[in-house]
Amino acid sequence: MRPDCLFPLYADVGSLPGVGPKTAPLLEKLAGPLVKDVLFLAPTGLVDRRPMATVQAAAEGRVATVEVVIGAHRPPPGRPGPGRGKAPYRISVTDAATDFQLVFFRADPNWLRSLAPEGERRVVSGKIEFYDGMAQMVHPDHVLPLDEAADIPAIEPIYPLTAGLTQRAVRKAALGALERAPELEEWIDRPLLEAKGWPSWRAALEALHHPESGGDLDPSAPARQRLAYDELFTHQTALAIARERARRGPGRSSQGDERLRARLYAALPYELTGAQKRTIAEIRDDMQDERRMMRLLQGDVGAGKTLVAFAAMLVAVEAGGQAALMAPTEILARQHVASMQEYLDAVGLRMAALTGRDKGRARAETLEALRSGETDIVIGTHALFQPDVAFKDLRLVVIDEQHRFGVEQRMALGDKSPEGAPPADMLLMTATPIPRSLALAQHGDLDISILDEKPPGRKPIETKLVSLERYDEVVDGLKRALARGARIYWVCPLVEESELSDLAAAEERARTLSAVLGKEAVVLAHGRLTPAEKDAAMRRFASGDAQLLVATTVIEVGVNVPEATVMVVERAERFGLAQLHQLRGRVGRGEAASHCLLLFGAPLSAAARARLSIMRESEDGFRLAEEDLRLRGAGDLIGVKQSGLPKFRIADLERQGDLMRVAHQDARVVIERDPDLQSARGQALRVALHLTEQMAANAFLSAG
C-alpha cells in the first residue's frame, strides 16, 4: 500500500502547471507518466543569465542579459502581416554602451510592437550572434519590462528535451513537481549523511533543480551524490530483500568431510592460488548453511574457475549427494569433462556426460545411473533440465556462462532435487570479468566470489598491434611458425563476404590462407555450422591434424587447446575489450611462450586506438573491464552479457561505482538487522522503496 505522503507525486503529468493535452504526451515520452518522473528529471546543463551592462565584449554564442532602450522597428519588405517571406523582422536596441538588434522570423508584427514598444526600456536575454559585424539576438528567450525582469533566473538549468517541448515548458513542469515533493523521514544513516555532507532528500531535490554553478551538475556534487545513493541504496535493498526471502526458503546443509578434496589437492601439480582457496572456502561455508546457496563465481581468463567448481561439486558428493554442471554448448560441456577427467581416478568419482547428442540406449543408461545415484557428477547442456532427467540426491547445480541461460532454465535444473527435498544449491559462473559496480547492479541478490589471481607459471602473452597493410608479413611469419609445429587461431568478425562491409569474412579468409599455407593445415569453425561440423573442426585443431583454425567469436569461450600459442584477431578495432580479452585467453595455456596479434585497419579512431593500446598494456581482465566501462559507458555495455542491468535516473555507474559498493554494504546490513523493515529507519526506507519503485520489493511492500 502506497504511503499517503507520496500520493501527490503519483498524479499524471497532465496535472502539472502549463501541461495541457498536447504537452502531456510529450512530457510523458521524455520523463514518464507521473509527477515523480518529472521530479527526477535532472538538468544536464545551465545558462548563466546574470545581468551585464553591455553586450559589447560578449563572445559569440554566449547568452547575455542586458537592459536596453527599444529603438526602431524594421519589418521585412512586402505586404504587412505575419509570416511574410524569409526576411527577418529587426528591432534596434541600445544597451549601456552599444547598439545591437533583436531578430525575429515569421513573427506577428503587432505582437512584436506590443512586446517591445519603441522608446521603452526592456530587459532582454538570449544568445549573441554576429551578422555583418553587428551583434544580434535571434528570437530572444526573454523580452520583459523592468518590473518583471526578476522572473529571469540568474542561473537557468537546461533539461533534456524531445521534439515539441521547450525549455520553458519543462522548467515550469519540473518546478511544479518540486512544489509537490514532501518532506520525508530520513532513511540514510545519520553518520553517513554527516560524513558525506549530504543534504536531506527534499533539500537535494531543491539543489538539483536550482543549480548555482556548473559544479552542481557534476556527479560529485553533494545533492547529486545523495540522490544517486538513494537510487543505488533502494535498488540494493530490494535485491537484498529478494535474496533474504530466497535464503529464508528451505535449503539443505551439505557438510563435506574433505576426503575427496584432499585427494584432489594432492593430485594437483601446483598449489591453489589464494583466490581459489578463499573462494572454495566461501562456497563450502554457504553449502554447510541450512539456507540455500545462491552465489556468482566471477573469474578472469585462466584463473581456475573450473577447478573451484569441481571442488564445490566434491563437497556435495562428500555429503552423500550429487552435483550437476550445465554448460551452454556441447563443446564447452565436453571440455569440462576432459579437464576434470584427469582428476577422477585420483579422487575416485563416477562422472557422466549428457548432451543433446546422446540418444537411445546410451542416454537411457546415463539417466538410470543418475536416478540410482550410481553417477556422482554429471556434466551436460540444456539436456540436463529435460523432464525425464531425475537424480537420486541432487545437492549442487553449477551453471557455466550463466548469462546464456534463462532464469527458468536455471531453476528447472535446481528443482530436480528428490521429491520433498529443498532445491539444490546454485553456483553461477561467468568467464567475463564485469566491473564491480555493474556486477552489484545486476547480481546484487547473489553472493559474489571473485577469482582475481592466475595460477603460478602462466606466462604473459606478448600482444602486438599490427596494421592490416602488413598482412603479407604476418602470413609469412605464420608460415614459419607452422613449420615449427605451432597451432594458431585466426579470428574474423564475419562469416561470409558482404558488399556492405569491408570486414574480413571467415570463409574467404580460410580460402586465402589455405591457398598459401596448405589446405590440410587450415580448418574453419563458425556459428552457422551444425554442432557436428563445429565439433569436427575443433577436434581436428585440438588433435593437431589441422594447425590453423579460422573462426568467428564462436571460440571466445570454452575452447582449451594448450598447444595453441598464436592468436590473430583481424579487424581488432571492431571488437570490444571484453571480447578481445576472451579471445586472447585462448592462448597462453601451455608452457610455450604465446603471442596475440591485433590486426587493425587504418586509420584508427581515437576510441579504437585507446582500446587496443589498453589491450597491449594489460592482461588483467578486471582492469580491462573497468577501462571498457570508462570508455564505452554502462549503457553500451548492456547486451547479452549484461542483460538486466538497471537504468538509473541520477546515478552514474561509470563515475559513481564507489557509491554502489557503499549502497550494497549498507543494504545488506539493514536487511540483516531489520529483515521486515519494522524499525523507524525501516519504515522510512519503505517509503523510499515505493518512491524509486524497486520492483523486486513490490510484493514484500504490498504485504507489509
Image (tube, rainbow, N blue to C red):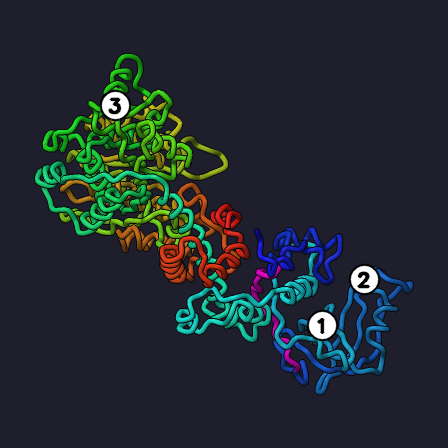
The amino acid at mark 3 is Leu
Residue that mark 1 sits on: 137
**How crowded is the residue under tag 1: few (<14 C-alpha within 10 Å), some, or many (20+)?**
many
SS under mark 2: loop
Relative side of 423 to 193, left or right: left
Q: Which residues are magenta?
A: 38-51
Give the residue displayed 50% in from the left and 61% down from the top: 684
Q: Which residue is mark 2?
A: 106
- Disc 1 marks a residue whose amino acid type is Met
Q: Quadrant of residue 549?
A: top left
Whole-number angstrom distance, CA of label 3 to CA of label 1: 81 Å
Q: Position of residue 634 (x, y in %)?
A: 44, 53
Under mark 2, the amino acid is Arg
Residue 661 painted magenta: no
Residue under numbered circle 3 = 370
**Mark with earlier residue (3, 2):** 2
Q: Residue furthest top?
A: 361
Q: Residue at x 37, y 34 (%)?
A: 410
Between discs 3 and 1, the one toward the N terminus? 1
Q: Position of residue 470 (x, y in %)?
A: 31, 45
Q: Residue furthest right?
A: 79
Q: Residue furthest bottom?
A: 96
Which of these two is toward me, 284 or 161? Answer: 284
